Amino acid sequence: MPSMPKSSPWPTTISTPRLLLRPAESTDVQEFTRLWTDPEVRRFLGGPVAEEKLPLYQQHFASRPNVFAVSTRKDMAVIGSVLIDSASRFDDRREVSYGLLPEHWGQGYAREAVAAVVEWAFVNVTSDDASIIAVTQEANARSCRLLEAIGMRRIDSFVEFGAPQALFSVERQRLRIGR
């Protein structure tokens, strides 16, 4: 279970057994740029971010609230990101988004990071809705399994960006943390 204060203003740091999740900093630009441009990471996200849009992404990611850089406690290397949108396009519900660099896939890091940030968000990101949602392409089986593993259940599907999408949701009492 992640250790965190009962209520903490942003910025905050979340610790898990293997990870440290901290506010994204401008010094993380190289790793975040890889997340935005890597074809495998972006496979189910519409492809790499266009080169002409990168400067805007690079300029603003570190100043956004609730954007966490995910680093391993072992060597403090940034391996990905998790973000909570406090007012998503889905009825202003809190939405979690995440990405890990491909060389860190399959080790349970994403599950550990996403569960920790979702738990933190239930306490620290206010909402009129009791749940937190996530959206992934139906074809992204790994992401669907991750969301189900932390207790999210599929509540809707729709087509967007030319592909079937799955909408997942979890309430605090259903959230599963740990490996």
Image (spheres, grey):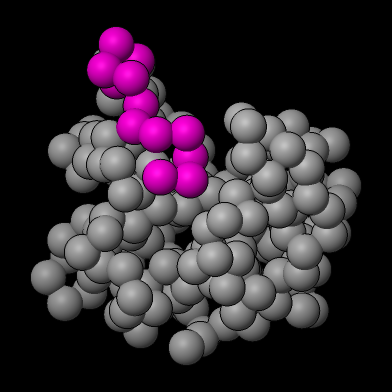
Work out whether residue 8 or residue 157 is closer to the camera in this orientation and state it: 157
Tell me if 124 is positioned left or right of 73 in this view: right
Total marks shown come to: 0
For the point 34% across and 75% down, which residue is it? 106
For the point 60% across and 79% down, which residue is it? 149
Does residue 100 belong to the magenta stretch?
no
Q: Quadrant of residue 105?
A: bottom left
| Place of residue 44 in the rendered image (x, y in percent of width and height, measured from the top left) | 48, 45
| Residue located farthest toward the top when viewing the structure as drawn | 52
For the point 26% across and 59% down, which residue is it? 102
The magenta span reads: 43-54
SS assignment for the magenta stretch, majority: loop
Q: Is residue 82 above or below residue 42?
A: below
For the point 26% across and 17% down, which residue is it? 51
Work out whether residue 79 or residue 168 is closer to the camera in this orientation and state it: 168
Does residue 48 belong to the magenta stretch?
yes
Q: Is residue 38 above or below residue 26?
A: below
Work out whether residue 104 or residue 23 is closer to the camera in this orientation and state it: 104
| Place of residue 111 in the rendered image (x, y in percent of width and height, measured from the top left) | 48, 73
Residue 108 at least partly seen? yes
Q: Is residue 75 above or below residue 87?
A: below
Residue 32 at least partly seen? no
Work out whether residue 59 or residue 10 is closer to the camera in this orientation and state it: 59
Tell me if 66 is positioned left or right of 135 in this view: left
| Residue located farthest toward the bottom when viewing the structure as drawn | 179
| Place of residue 121 in the rendered image (x, y in percent of width and height, measured from the top left) | 63, 58
Q: Is residue 169 above or below residue 31?
A: below
